[in-house]
Each structure stands twice: as structure tokens, then as C-alpha cells.
Image (cartoon, rainbow, N blue to C red):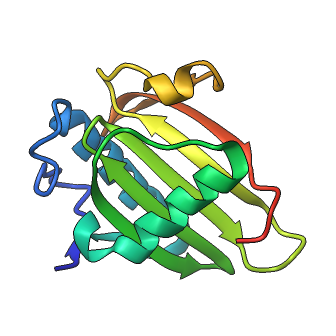
Amino acid sequence: MPTPVDFVTVSTAGLESSPVADALAGLRANEARYFRNKYDHGFVVEPASEAQDTVDWVHGILRSERDLVIASRPLEATAFEVAGIRMAYVFYESGLSINVMYTIEDAGKRAVGFKLADGMEVPQELASTFKFARQRSKLAGTIRGSYFTIKQEH
């Protein structure tokens, strides 16, 4: 069942099995706040098992663009369109968050972003390929992030 993400009262609902559930909930709330403030869009997630098309789309992009397979189990996902951009997020049990920003116009920006919840190690499948920059968030603590540009059509 789709659940709106509250960034005022941060909840770990849906993320309880993560060893960094509190930090992952803060990371999810941070994304919800961003979309509310920038686009007046309500960030709604659902269990990954109910959002299999979104998970498959994200995983397909990772495989075809960088031959990446994420070892951690997806817990939640969401997909929506805002301001001509198709967005997808998958939140993983390890504390990893992957987002795809795919501008619908052919000449637009298209990228995959990785964010690591505070307290988690860099996943082995990403460690040798990506460098992670740090940023501070009131909701999520220290977020480490990286990205790559999508080259193909998806």
C-alpha cells in the first residue's frame, strides 16, 4: 500500500529490517522534503514487492549502463513524474538509496544517483568504481553520495 513520507515526524516504517533504519528513514525524509519544497510534490513509497516495475527499471539501467547488480534487498520504491522528469527511487536494506532522474525530453539530463545512509559501509559493488562526496542533512545526518550519467535510452 502506498505510504506518504512525513519529513516532520520521521518514521522507520517499512525500513525496520535495515541495520541503519533510523538513518535510512532520515535519508528518505530528506528526499521527501526536497520534493515538497522544490516541486510541491508529495513523496509516496510502497514496498518494493508492490513496485516491482520500478525496481526492475532501476536495476535494468544499472545492468545495461555499468554492469552493476546491487547485492542488498530492496525494501521500498517509488516512481513519479515531476516537471518533465521521470524519477524513481529504491531504498535498500543495507542503507543504500538509488535514484534515477530521467528527463523525458531527448536532450535533457539523465543520471543515476547513489546515497549512503549514515553508518553504512560503501557496498562492495560500488566501492571500486565510485567516489562518494559528503553532505550534511538535519534529517539524515551525513549523507555520502555519488552518481553517473545515463548514456543509453531506457
Q: Quadrant of the C terminus?
A: bottom right
Q: Quadrant of the N terminus?
A: bottom left
Most extreme residue toward the right is 107
Numbered label tally: 0
In this view, 132 is above or below 57: above
Q: Nearer the viewer, residue 82 or 2?
A: 2
In this view, 58 is above or below 131: below
Q: Quadrant of residue 148?
A: top right
41 with respect to 139 (left or right)? right
Q: Quadrant of residue 17?
A: top left
Q: Nearer the viewer, residue 37 or 90?
A: 90
74 with respect to 56 (left or right)? left
In the rendered image, residue 46, in percent from the top left (x then y), is placed at 25, 71
Q: Nearer the viewer, residue 7 or 49?
A: 49
Viewer can see residue 135: no
Q: What's the residue at 71%, 51% (across, down)?
A: 65
102 with respect to 96 (left or right)? right
In this view, 116 is above or below 65: above
Q: What's the residue at 51%, 29% (across, down)?
A: 125
In the rendered image, residue 66, in percent from the top left (x then y), is placed at 68, 43
In the rendered image, residue 97, in percent from the top left (x then y), is placed at 41, 45
Q: What's the residue at 82%, 79% (across, down)?
A: 105
Q: What's the residue at 28%, 65% (across, down)?
A: 48
Viewer can see residue 30: yes
